[in-house]
Image (cartoon, grey):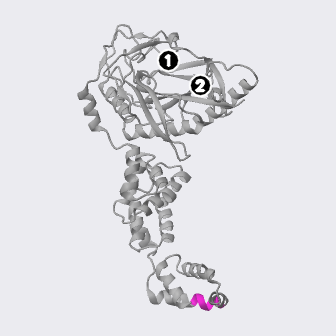
Amino acid sequence: MLFEPVIGLEVHAQLKTKSKIFCGCSTQFGNPPNANTCPVCTGMPGVLPVLNKQAVTFAIKAALATHCKINQESRFDRKNYFYPDLPKGYQISQFALPIAEHGYLEIDDNLSSILKIGITRIHMEEDAGKLIHDSARARSMVDLNRTGVPLIEIVSEPDLRTPQQAGAYLRKLHSILKYIDVCDCNMEQGNFRCDANISLRPLGQKAFGIRAELKNLNSFKHVEKAISYEIERQTYVLEEGRAVIQETRLWDPVKNKTHSMRGKEEAHDYRYFPDPDLVPLIVDDKWILSVEKQMPELPDEKYSRFIKEYNLEDYDAKVLTSSLELADFFEIVAQPLKDKKQAANWIITIFLGMLNSKDFSISNSPVTAIEFSKLLTLIENNKITTIVAKIVFDEMVKTKKDPEIIVKEKNLEQVSDLSELETMVLEVFSENPGEVVLYRNGKTKLFSFFMGKIMKKTQGKADPKIVTQMLKSKL
């Protein structure tokens, strides 16, 4: 029997506020354990939460960027469950009335089609703490610095069908949240993490199957690998004639498999009820309008503009707008250049290749956008050849020097003196008389042989246009 996967994703994104969602404690990552705490976020008796207005503004921005309907009245609820890093014994979240609902994201499934993935809801909530397990002794310690940090949970409709679509959805959402500057999306620090719900159903059946939830996936590759494994696991279970168990599972990236964590809770297990310490949240039209005015250009808008304004190919525009940092880098590099496509080609092939090989990010790249633009300007002004430019770029990566200084220090300026080049051309002919005869007898593919010899003599500094014309004339 053939089965169809049904996948829904729940993304937790930490909002970039300086203080927590219900108290004034810092959200700074990396501080000593329990340094960012107070009686409110540690759940001391008699304390009262106060909602962080900036967190609400960020949630509104996320809702606008994902085409969601913003509810003018939303409420906070208590989600009750016991865990050692949850000091109050409940989490303040939104359940019955979230801040936003009924949105969507459009993703490219790499099959020349655009898929619209529904977003069920966006709700606000506080994060829990963190347990640290002592490997030397049988004990666990709790760090409550993260307790009370503001989150939005973005819940998709079960519209995804493959691990690749899930990865594309997450990358698009990650990019949008970075563009609107509401989340730094650092996955290693847990600021952007995902729970994936996977079920299988016989192909053609409308009713959903029993789902398993994969918790706390914090990389795109892990999400895709974990979903792929879970599809294979559930397929095997069903083909054996057994039933899939509704449960929560964890992904083991070392063994490349999932394992059971606990039975999956339903909403009634959490005993949701309205938080009596928090009044309803009212978001009026004036507030929404003020946030709309703050909205930056989003990835899809920037992609369309890059194609129109810079005359880029579809692939190049997709790559360059995949992150805000890369898009900004491109625009700085391209600004003084006549040939914007050359800027795109060099960034995608040479610059990104360097970042990947050296494990750098754009923010800590040894070559800045301004320096990279200077390098391409040298090519455009016929000061250096493309061959030399690659040598200069490698030197820039090593030394962080200005490209113009490197060209002068290493005497790499383009050779365009006609008499000098003519002498070299005649030398190449005298050194390779047999090839000259073969060329004149019709073996014209040898032209690149002569060009290579000239470039070798000039260490790649010869003006290729002049050399081409001269070789054709002399031959």
Does 436 sit above or below residue 33?
below
Q: Position of residue 419 (x, y in %)?
A: 46, 90
Q: Position of residue 297 (x, y in %)?
A: 34, 44
Q: Which residues are magenta?
A: 427-433
**Residue at x 43% of width, y 17% of height:** 95
Can residue 16 be seen at all in this image of the molecule? no
Quarter location, residue 48: top left
Q: Which mark is residue 206?
A: 2
Of labels 2 and 1, the one closer to you: 2
Find disc 1 in the rendering and name its residue. Answer: 85
Can residue 428 be seen at all in this image of the molecule? yes
Q: Residues within 10 Å of mark 1 (few under 14, many from 20)?
A: many
Q: Is residue 147 left or right of residue 23?
A: right
Q: Secondary structure of the magenta portion, mostly? A: helix
Does 293 sit above or below residue 409?
above
Q: Is residue 56 left or right of residue 245?
A: left
In terms of depth relative to the viewer, which is nearer, 221 or 242? 242
Q: Is label 2 in a helix, a strand or a loop?
A: loop
Q: Which amino acid type corresponds to the residue marked 1 in the rendered image?
A: Asp
For this orientation, the residue located farthest to the left is 286
Does 135 sit above or below residue 75?
below
Label 2 with label 1: CB-CB less than 8 Å: no
Q: Residues within 10 Å of mark 2 (few under 14, many from 20)?
A: few
Q: Is label 1 in a helix, a strand or a loop?
A: loop
Q: Which amino acid type corresponds to the residue marked 2 in the rendered image?
A: Lys
**Residue at x 50% of width, y 49% of height:** 360
Q: CA distance from mark 2 to mark 1?
A: 40 Å
